[in-house]
Image: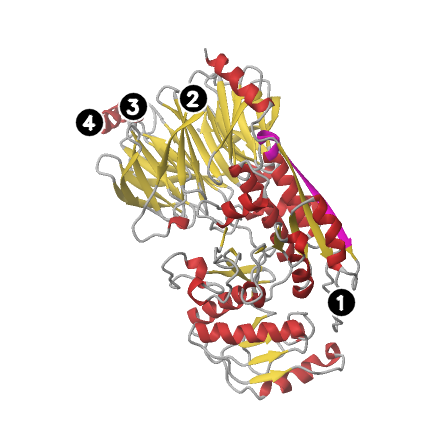
Amino acid sequence: MKFRSLAVSLALLAAPAWAQDLTIGYLRLQETPPPTVSDLDLPPPDLGIAGARLGIEDNATTGRFTGQTYALDLVDIAPGEDIAAAAGPLLERTDLLLVDAPADALLSVTDLPAAADALVFNVAAPDNRLREGDCRANMLHALPSTAMRTDALAQFLVLRRWDELPMVTGGDPADQAFAASIEQSLRKFGLRVGDRKDWRYDTDIRRAATTEMPLFTQEFGRYDALIVADEIHDFARYMLYNTWEPRPIVGSEGLVPTGWHPVVEQWGARQLQNRFLEIAGRAMQPRDYAAWAAIRTLGEAATRTGSAEPEALRDYILGPDFELGGFLGRPLSFRAWNGQMRQPIPLVHPRGLVAQAPLEGFLHPVTELDTLGRDAPETQCTDFSE
Amino acid sequence: MIRTTLATSALALAVALPAQADEIWVTNEFDDTISVIDIETLEVTRTIPTGERPRGITFAKDHSVVYICASDSDAVQVMDPETGEILHDLPSGEDPEQFVLHPDNRHLYIANEDDAITTVVDTVSREVVAQIDVGIEPEGMAVSPDGTIAITTSETTNMAHWIDTETQELFANTLVDSRPRHAEFVKDGTELWVSSEIGGTITVFDVETQSEKAKIDFDLPNIHPDRVQPVGFEFTNGDEIAFVALGPSNHLAVVNAETYEVEDYILVGRRVWHMAFNADRSKLFTTNGLSGDVTVVDVASRTAEKTIKVGRFPWGAAFRPTN
């Protein structure tokens, strides 16, 4: 008797009602990294793409049982090329897209008429404005915004009662954006940035760190922690242990808020890290994690809805039933007001996890994860209200 | 009453043997050890070294040997529970996390977490009988009481995979909520329960049709639903009441298995994970990963009675009768 019902299920397995083939585009505009003093941490050539590949593999394993197949359609263009032109043919092949490009290039893709009904995942641009005034209804963000990271750091500073907080800022636009976001986050949590200095040295600081850095930081006087805004990782790595005051460095170096890091190992994360290491031969970085999460999001939504239509997927992803296991201790979901993925933010040093935001005591009426980044009542994004 | 019986028989044996009470065996994931708890004194009497990263633990039906998933040693170890000596390793496939012993007392169904495979091992010939492709990060394992169906749940694929033990092939795959962790057949094999850690639910399947019959939600006052993460669960005699470990919410849920309603919550240690009963199921022992201890729960009064310090990251628990 049992085996009669087995036969029925076997039939179901052979021809699932929702057999589908999902092709997901990955459009990358390669970037020339800004010049830095040291080349210690050049981005791996497959940054982001390797995460997407793992996401496809993970989806495909599930797809074996649901009758869905997944394929990655990679379009990889050189620095300076026209990304909107490259997006055109890709959008003819698929309307599910990951874009790995700076903010303006990303917007030139989302604003294409051909992309109006597509679903685009931002996996590389942390800019707060993309979640605010420059948000787009067809664009979701799998990478945490800079605000989410700086809010996480601010929570930690409050927790440790470190409130004397000078800041050093580098000259790159990414450094400036990070510094601006730090200012906002500290204000949000009742702190403020102390004295500020800009880093504009053009000598080889590697030879002179032990003499220059103490002098450079001496003017700050007494403080609790020094914030460094050095998102391109140019100078601040030489500031650690060389400050005048023996105080910690936080921000872009030292204690760093990040979307993902090799030291994340709890909540089953080790399995994800191992799977990634196996296919990429290197450690998983935040952009890899964002690409993995974006593709897993599409896979999860396709499995649950039985659909491959961007609109149906988007509705489900932004709806209350969507949740994705992301190995960070809390389910991942998406904010309905700006398309930002909710995720906990690990605060790390190179060899260990220091804390993970949202930190205990930072409360929220809906979910503590929304203490990180721009919340619904304060959002300037109107594209999602329809 | 039962306890006096045990005490009496222990006394009777005392002439020939040293007095010995029943035990709870707990694997300490980060210490590579097992802590053995004496059920009478509620103290750790032995700490036994194991392979690397011990997680799943189960005794042979006659309790002559204990099987241990030594995940990072890529082996299932077979130990003599009297001496604590490792008798031999079984081939297990890579990264065995959890397993279940078939009612034939001979075949182990093992979840290979890193390989998306379920391995079937013959404990007598010490050979791999079958390897079955399942979803990503298999973990929860169960075999029906009549031995015809084995279940593997996969954490990332979010499915219960139904294995026909005759052919060792999948015959159904059913979706559950996010990150399934543990599975049990109950009520003479007519129901299958699967916990979903991230989904925060238990799905109850009708085994005959493999269709969803009920879904159990948990609602703890003052704890955000994200933190309510059901993992291990066990049933009282007659499968009337289920005790469900709710992970980082640090509570057990007490679920009426007839109505599927949650009747109570019991505060235990931090990140409660798995559990084991004593012989008459009057006491429950939970492993609390983060606090590194075991909570003893009185089943009748539904209260936590005692905390016992064990090793780092206690994971699995198993009962060993000694009489």
Q: Which chain contains the residue that carries disc 4?
A: B
Tell me how far mark 2 sits from mark 3, CA to CA.
18 Å
* Of labels 2 and 4, the one closer to you: 2
Mark 4 nearby-residue class (10 Å; few <14, some 14–19, many ≥20): few
Q: Which chain contains the residue that carries disc 2?
A: B
Are the residues flagged by discs 3 and 1 in contact, CB closer than 8 Å?
Answer: no
Mark 2 nearby-residue class (10 Å; few <14, some 14–19, many ≥20): many
Q: Can residue B23 be seen in this view?
A: no
The verdict on a common chain for dots 2 and 4 is: yes
Residue where numbered disc 1 is placed: A39
Are the residues flagged by discs 1 and 4 in contact, CB closer than 8 Å?
Answer: no
Q: Which chain contains the residue that carries disc 1?
A: A
* Of labels 4 and 3, the one closer to you: 3
Residue where numbered disc 3 is placed: B238
* Of labels 2 and 3, the one closer to you: 2
Q: What residue span does the magenta drawing correspond to?
A: A63-76
Amino acid carrying label 1: it is Asp
Q: What element carries label 1?
A: loop
Question: Is B154 covered by the magenta stretch?
Answer: no
* Of labels 1 and 4, the one closer to you: 1
- Residue drawn at x 39%, y 64% as measured from the top left: A362
Mark 3 nearby-residue class (10 Å; few <14, some 14–19, many ≥20): few
First-in-chain label (4 vs 3): 4
Residue B1 disc label: 4
Q: What element carries label 3?
A: helix
Position in image of residue B98 (x %, y %): 50, 33
Residue B207 disc label: 2
Tell me how far mark 4 sits from mark 3, CA to CA.
19 Å
Q: Is residue B16 visible?
A: yes
The verdict on a common chain for dots 2 and 3 is: yes
